[in-house]
Image (spheres, coloured by chain):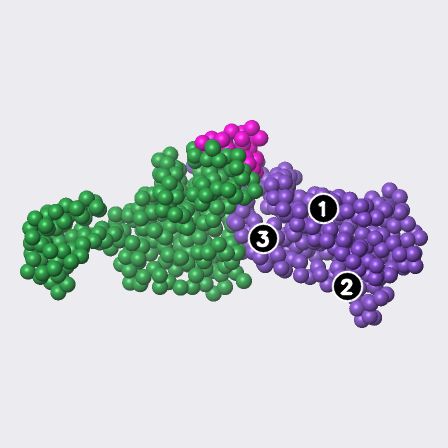
Amino acid sequence: MTDLLEPAIDARRGNLLADSWLMTTRLLKQIVRVPDLLVFSTIQPIMFVLLFRYVFGGAIVVGPHGGYVQYLMPGIFVQTLLFNGAATGIGMADDLQKGLVDRFRSMPIARSALLVGRSISDLIRALLVFAIMLIVGVLTGFRFGDGWGGAIGGTLLMFGFAFAFSWIGIMIGLVVKTVEAAQSAGFIWLFPLTFASSAFVRTDTMPSWLRGFADHNPVTVVVNSVRRLYLSPTNSREFGVPALGSQLLQALLWLAGVLLVFVPLSVRRFRRMSR
Amino acid sequence: MTDAVVVESLVKTFGTTRALDGLDLTVPEGSVLGLLGPNGAGKTTAVRVLSTLLVADSGRAEVCGVDVRRDPVRVRRLIGLTGQFAAIDDYLTGRENLVLFGRLFHLSRSAAAQRADELLERFELTDAASRIAKTYSGGMRRRLDIAASLIARPRVIFLDEPTTGLDPRSRLSMWDVIRDLVRDGTTMLLTTQYLEEADLLASSIAVIDAGHVIARGTSDELKASVGGTRLELVVDHAERLAIAADVLERVGDGPPSIEQSDRRVTVPVTSGAGVLAEVVRQLDGAGVGISDLAIRRPTLDDVFLGLTGHRAAEIEADPEPAVAGADHRDGGRS
């Protein structure tokens, strides 16, 4: 009887770090093998930049001396990263649908590695997408105005925010379980969130009922914080961007709140698959 | 002989459906148990409980003496699972898939690579090893899928409907693959909807219906219960029936039975097409005209009809739909 109990190979207990890294590299290979995904996830934001910068931009007044591209790009960056994060849920649903999640769950690995690996690989994809968008921004006239510290701080904040929101995507993927459903359910809620915000226009141009929502919308407070960190103080003042303190505080609260709610929810949902 | 898999009074409900309703099974080490039943009988649920993907409501399930509920991690080291749909990463090459699964079993980089090459060779995928799996045919995907479940040299393999959805040629090659595993003495639990498949691959068969076993035995025993393979002949004139019965008695394996009203003679046979040709020759020689002549093999339907009195297809309440759907992956909730 004892020989039956010997594992066939020397298999240690699942190691979260090692397993997560294996999952991450698996998904990074996907990015390289299916470049269309990366292309399509950047084409849309590039179209947005061109549309708002050159088509609507002339008609949108954000400050006394123009400079709409300065106003626009932080909004575009945040929007792009949020959509990138939502795509996490589609990948999750894909793995579920194909039975890959079942295979992984029947193996002696740390099960949370599936979630962590996906989250990390999507963060790396976000870096790629951000780099592309930054180049597009600079080509269309965007410039950092508040030094290296601001540029790095603003970027970190955006990535933290996108990481937190990608867990909403993961949760949606776990709940809907098909790629098609994840595609619609994963993105639809992002449209009101990004458009009824300060991402493209000043919220003081909106009717008061909408402004109440827009001013406390997580996208608004993150975009405003990023503007304060990316742009020169003069720029920020002219655009009527609220002071950094309150905006950053609200942004960090949103970030923490979303993580605190959706990470445990997703993990619980994942565990409950065996019920 | 030790039992590698033991299942006792296993119960699993999804809402109001009792997917498993007191299931009892044993698979002796080194043998293959065919779990035969229609869609919704509970086959997949049983495999999912045994492979630690689902937790049963009550009852006991052990793999190599390890309880699946109490020590699932240890069970996962002992098993290989091949589900109904090829669970491989489309964007990795065949080799990368196998190396990934090997690494996840904590094989060293070189050991994983070596094992991957071994399996690719064995499943005739060496030529396609560097192509991404998305380009593979259905049969190749299934072979890679089975290879993936063998990475860690599991003690017990669960094959859940390994040939469902495959074209006939891929099905034959899949049977070859499974027969090789059987020859190596692998302990296997194989679920199938096809009596023929269970017959070919399993050393013993358990027929399940509505979540519990309704019959068990070798395929011969089961077939005997429904009459085995028969040759049916309908002659053109009733007065020739006696001559026809004589011919069939010489060719068949037992006494023929005659149904006067249908001008039909039936006889049990063992071999298929050869008998058919012989019968035609002899009937021709004896001047008997044939209206209809056919070999009837017992199907799952016949077994079911014999055992339960209803046809397999009549069974409803399907907790494990046959389509690739999210529902059953989650155990049929929602």
Image vertical order of residue A6 relative to residue A217, above or below:
above
**Of callouts 3 and 1, the N-terminal one:** 3
**Distance from the alpha carbon under mark 3 to that under mark 2:** 28 Å
Q: Which chain is green?
A: B
Of labels 3 and 1, the one closer to you: 1
Position of the C terminus of chain A by quadrant: bottom right
Q: Closer to the camera, B205 or A137? A: A137
- Label 3, on which residue? A93
Magenta stretch, main secondary structure class: helix
Start-end of magenta stretch: B96-121
Picture quarter with the N terminus of chain A: top left
Considering the numbered disc 3 on the image, is that residue within a helix, a strand or a loop? helix
The residue type indicated by label 2 comes to Ala
Q: Are marks 3 and 2 on the same chain?
A: yes
Residue shown at 87%/43% (left/top)? A149
Which shade is chain A? purple
